[in-house]
């Protein structure tokens, strides 16, 4: 049995009129993650809410202790969010990021679409486990394959994948065997655009409780202007 401590926190920030981030912190189901409504599209809060609801419903509806097909679960959620979005906004639809982890058999199974992130902390190691699905990163990967790719700098952070838009998004799947002492942060870009990775690592490593780490991180993002909603879910693994 995995022994863990978790905490979740979301702040609307100093500029937004609505919080379009959503989260799941479910120690019973061993399910943790965040979703962030896509800016520039209507219904961001609805997109993130529907995305999280679909993931939670699917995970909780699965019997047995095996590892479910997370890609299929995300694709099903995408279909539902897409259908809801067409009813809400037929001309544009709606969109959300999604980054979540499910613990099974002492392994953290991560599913990822968009530019929310999951970080992993261990003594002397702090890494970003997910890759942002942005125009800039897509171009870098394609150039590494020898393709010639150009993009406008103003669009470098635009998403190339999200939940709810036409087509089925490719889902990144990451597996991370757990160790006692591991710490994981799931967060939206309202955090990552304002708090640098080395700072995140220091704050996570120094905290004695997951809630304390989250409060420090979110407060720092808000102090630096809080232009976006800032949301995080923190996970401390005591025994895998």
Image: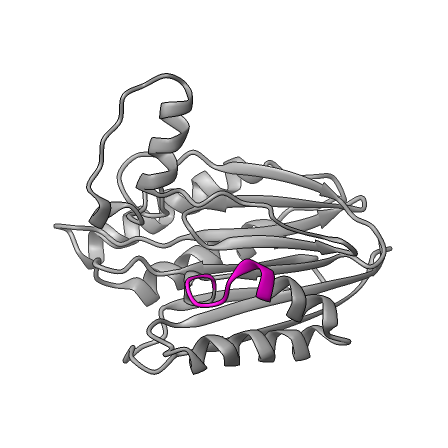
- Please state which of residues 186 and 201 is positioned toward the viewer in this rendering: 201
Q: Quadrant of residue 75?
A: top left
Residue 148: x, y in percent? 27, 21
Q: Is residue 27 in view from this perspective?
A: no
Residue at 42% of width from left, 23% of height from top?
Answer: 144
Figure colour scheme: one colour
Vertical placement of 160 versus 209: above or below? above
Is-magenta flag for residue 41? no
Residue 78 lies, in percent from the top left, at 39, 44
Most foreground residue, 99 or 202? 202
User: Going by the picture, which residue comes out furthest to the left?
Assistant: 91
Number of disc labels? 0
Q: Specify whether residue 197 is painted magenta.
A: yes
Furthest residue in direction top, as rendered: 146
Residue 10 in view, yes or no? yes
Q: Picture quarter containing residue 36?
A: bottom left
Residue nearer the viewer, 182 or 201: 201
| Horizontal side, residue 22 vs residue 92: left or right | right
**The N terminus sits in image quarter:** bottom right
Q: Which residues are magenta?
A: 192-199
What x and y, as percent, mark residue 121? Answer: 70, 56
Residue 81 drawn above or below residue 72: below
User: Residue at point 65% right, 74% down?
Assistant: 213
Task: Classify residue 130 as left or right of residue 148.
Answer: right
Residue 34: x percent and y percent?
Answer: 50, 60
Left or right of 230 on screen, residue 86 = left
Q: Residue at x 31, y 49 (%)?
A: 157
Q: Is residue 75 left or right of residue 176?
A: left
Instruction: Place residue 176 in its image quadrant.
Output: top right
Q: Residue at x 60, y 74 (%)?
A: 214
Rendered view: 54 above or below 46? above
């Amino acid at each position: 049995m995995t022994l863990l401590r978790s905490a979740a926190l979301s702040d609307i920030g100093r500029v937004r009129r609505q919080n379009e981030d959503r989260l799941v912190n479910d120690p019973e189901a061993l399910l943790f993650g965040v979703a962030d409504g896509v800016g520039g599209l209507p219904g961001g809060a609805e997109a993130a809410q529907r995305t999280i609801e679909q993931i939670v419903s699917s995970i909780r509806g699965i019997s047995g202790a095996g590892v479910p097909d997370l890609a299929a679960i995300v694709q099903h959620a995408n279909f539902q969010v897409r259908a809801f979005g067409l009813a809400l906004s037929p001309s544009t639809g709606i969109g959300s990021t999604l980054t979540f982890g499910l613990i099974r058999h002492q392994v953290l199974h991560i599913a990822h679409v968009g530019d929310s992130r999951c970080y992993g902390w261990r003594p002397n190691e702090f890494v970003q486990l997910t890759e942002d699905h942005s125009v800039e990163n897509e171009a870098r990967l394609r150039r590494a394959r020898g393709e010639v790719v150009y993009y406008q700098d103003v669009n470098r952070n635009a998403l190339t994948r999200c939940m709810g838009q036409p087509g089925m998004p490719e889902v990144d799947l990451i597996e991370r065997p757990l160790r006692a002492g591991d710490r994981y942060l799931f967060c939206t870009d309202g955090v990552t655009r304002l708090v640098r990775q080395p700072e995140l690592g220091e704050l996570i490593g120094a905290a004695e409780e997951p809630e304390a780490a989250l409060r420090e991180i979110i407060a720092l993002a808000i102090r630096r202007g809080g232009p976006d909603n800032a949301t995080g879910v923190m996970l401390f693994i005591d025994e895998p």
